[in-house]
């Protein structure tokens, strides 16, 4: 009976729909695992097609291509190299399963179908997959019994305990677990619970990728029933790590090995957003990005994310001043661009503002200037940025933070124009924290320069849209500390107004913020995607009706 098993954790970066490219990455990782002496190479959930494939899996041609990819990889294992565990959609009759396969000796030796299909937050797997008709049995590999827990099957009791009761020696959990602030702690807690309830070590193998709004951060690990983690793979980085498993009285135990340090706090959020920006731009084949750099903190942080994700040579920043733009903003924008090392140019919008004013004067006659004229300025800027994007092929990054998106403090077809929004799930108060962190950080794994890249003067000055003289955000909104606390209670905790007021907030302010949140839903439906970092983001997590008369207390 096998007494020791070498398992390579293959934390690679699949791309949804790129079956050929994904298979090449699998082959390269398997070759690395073979060179390290692995018996078995384990990959993440649905690694063949990338996760989540959404309605792509409804296409018969896509299903066939996934099956052919699995069969081709299986045939290649006849070379005597390590066996593989890979994931792919798998059609059987009218049913489509989220499945994992043991590929060995030139064939598919075992198929395990996912039993528990998540249907919450960013997940809606029951829309496209069928659950396994029964809990799986352990699969045999070189005298060891492997229990496969595909993602959700780890998180809920039942499948793991069934596998243990049927003789599993260890549990392997291929995952597509998205990043959020609390993800690492939640994964460790779920794996610890399953390991303790079964008495078996668990190997958690996670996807690494940015996919539209979702970031997968890797951070694979092994955990023992006592809660110890003898192995940790890097977070936000690809890795092929060899783990050693030794047979004991109650199954195979993972021997202490690689212990990567996982970043926390502001660094973790920063790395997640950077990965999301990089993969969205790269996978959609944009040569670079263009950003309206206003001299404010949001656009400065967006530019820093872009440079760290892509390199300064692929980032174009444009200052679009009006008569209301302060001298400080002009100086700050240029200084920020210089610190980041990006291309920088200035295109004044005043000629267009005057032209629009003349065009609209007959229609607006007798009406005093108001937010209409302010929004025209924003839309002119959006038009210019989109013109640059069309002419040069660079994607526009928008710069609105979660606080602004929550209460509609953004202009449709203006500063909301663009293809991707790095700040979409980052509250304004967190924007400031991330700027401070980046200025003091050593950018390990990032492509931007070290040192202060966001001038202190940008961080310390009062935030303003500069669409009229002497304007500040707090003319229209509560201070951001108050606003963000109320928004987190409304959005992420789903609290009623009365509960928030009981926490010490003014009822009139809370009700006003709640109303702004609901009436801005139509804007958010038209907003570009952005990386999820909080528990509930705007998009896949939170799907509220646009037409909505509900208010707390009614």
Image: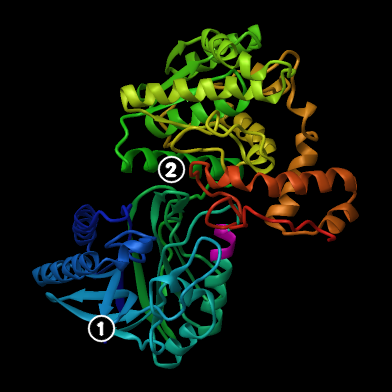
Compared to residue 426, the image places residue 65 above or below, namely: below
Instruction: Place residue 301 in its image quadrant.
Output: top right
Compared to residue 288, the image places residue 495 above or below, namely: below
Magenta segment main secondary structure = helix
Under circle 1, the secondary element is loop
Residue bearing mark 1: 93
Disc 2: CA contacts within 10 A as few (<14), some (14-19) or many (>=20): many
Q: Residue furthest left?
A: 79
Of the 4 image quadrants, the one containing the N terminus is bottom left
Q: Position of residue 38 (x, y in %)?
A: 24, 66
The answer to whether any part of residue 449 appears in the image is: no
Mark before the other along the chain sequence, 1 or 2: 1
In the drawing, does residue 24 fall left or right of residue 380?
left
As drawn, the label of residue 275 is 2
Judging depth in this view, the residue of 72 and 397 nearest the camera is: 397
Q: Are marks 1 and 2 in contact (CB under 8 Å)?
A: no
Residue drawn at the location 48% of the way across and 11% of the way down: 347
Measure how far apart labels 1 and 2 are at the Cα level.
38 Å
User: Is residue 184 a member of the stretch shown in magenta?
Assistant: yes
Residue drawn at the location 52% of the way across and 21% of the way down: 381
């Amino acid at each position: 009976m096998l007494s020791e098993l070498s398992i390579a954790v293959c934390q690679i970066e699949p791309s949804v729909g790129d079956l050929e490219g994904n298979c090449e990455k699998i082959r390269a990782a398997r070759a690395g695992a073979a060179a390290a002496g692995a018996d078995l190479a384990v990959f993440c959930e649905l690694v063949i097609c990338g996760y989540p494939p959404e309605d792509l899996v409804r296409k018969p041609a896509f299903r066939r291509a996934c099956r052919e990819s699995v069969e081709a990889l299986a045939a290649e294992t006849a070379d005597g190299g390590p066996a593989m565990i890979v994931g792919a959609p798998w059609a059987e009759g009218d049913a489509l399963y989220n499945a994992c396969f043991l590929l060995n000796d030139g064939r598919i030796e075992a198929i395990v179908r996912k039993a528990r299909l998540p249907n919450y937050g960013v997940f809606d797997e029951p829309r496209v997959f069928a659950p396994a008709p029964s809990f799986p049995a352990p699969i045999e590999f070189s005298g060891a019994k492997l229990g496969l827990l595909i993602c959700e099957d780890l998180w809920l009791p039942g499948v793991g305990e069934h596998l243990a009761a049927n003789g599993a020696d260890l549990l392997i959990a291929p995952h597509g677990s998205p990043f959020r602030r609390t993800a690492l702690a939640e994964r460790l807690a779920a794996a610890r619970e399953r390991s303790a309830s079964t008495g078996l070590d668990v190997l958690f193998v996670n996807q690494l990728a940015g996919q539209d709004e979702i970031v997968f951060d890797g951070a694979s690990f092994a955990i023992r029933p006592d809660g110890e983690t003898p192995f940790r793979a890097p977070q936000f980085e690809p890795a092929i790590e060899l783990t050693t498993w030794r047979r004991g009285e109650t199954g195979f135990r993972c021997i202490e090995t690689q212990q990567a340090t996982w970043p926390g706090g502001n660094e973790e959020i920063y790395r997640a957003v950077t990965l999301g920006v990089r993969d969205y731009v790269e996978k959609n084949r944009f040569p670079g990005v263009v950003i309206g750099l206003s001299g404010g903190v949001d656009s400065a942080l967006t530019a820093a994310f872009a440079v760290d994700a892509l390199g300064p040579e692929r980032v174009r920043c444009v200052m679009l001043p009006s008569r209301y733009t302060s001298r400080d903003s002009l100086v700050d924008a240029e200084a920020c661009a210089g610190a980041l090392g990006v291309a920088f140019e200035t295109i004044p919008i005043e000629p267009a503002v005057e032209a629009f004013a003349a065009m609209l004067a007959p229609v607006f006659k007798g009406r005093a200037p108001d937010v209409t004229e302010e929004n025209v300025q924003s839309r002119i800027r959006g038009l210019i940025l989109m013109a640059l994007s069309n002419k040069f092929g660079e994607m526009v990054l928008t710069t609105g933070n979660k606080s602004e998106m929550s209460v509609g403090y953004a202009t449709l077809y203006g500063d909301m124009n663009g293809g991707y929004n790095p700040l979409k799930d980052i509250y304004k108060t967190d924007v400031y924290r991330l700027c401070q962190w980046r200025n003091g950080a050593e950018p390990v794994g990032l492509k931007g320069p070290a040192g202060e890249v966001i001038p202190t003067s940008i961080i310390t000055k009062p935030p303003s849209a500069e669409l009229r003289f002497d304007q500040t955000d707090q003319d229209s909104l509560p201070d951001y500390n108050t606003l963000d606390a109320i928004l987190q209670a409304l959005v992420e905790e789903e609290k009623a107004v009365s509960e928030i007021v009981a926490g010490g907030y003014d009822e009139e302010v809370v009700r006003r913020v709640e109303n702004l949140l609901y009436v801005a839903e139509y804007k958010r439906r038209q907003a570009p995607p952005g990386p999820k970092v909080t528990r509930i983001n705007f998009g896949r997590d939170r799907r509220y009706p646009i037409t909505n008369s509900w208010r707390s207390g009614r």
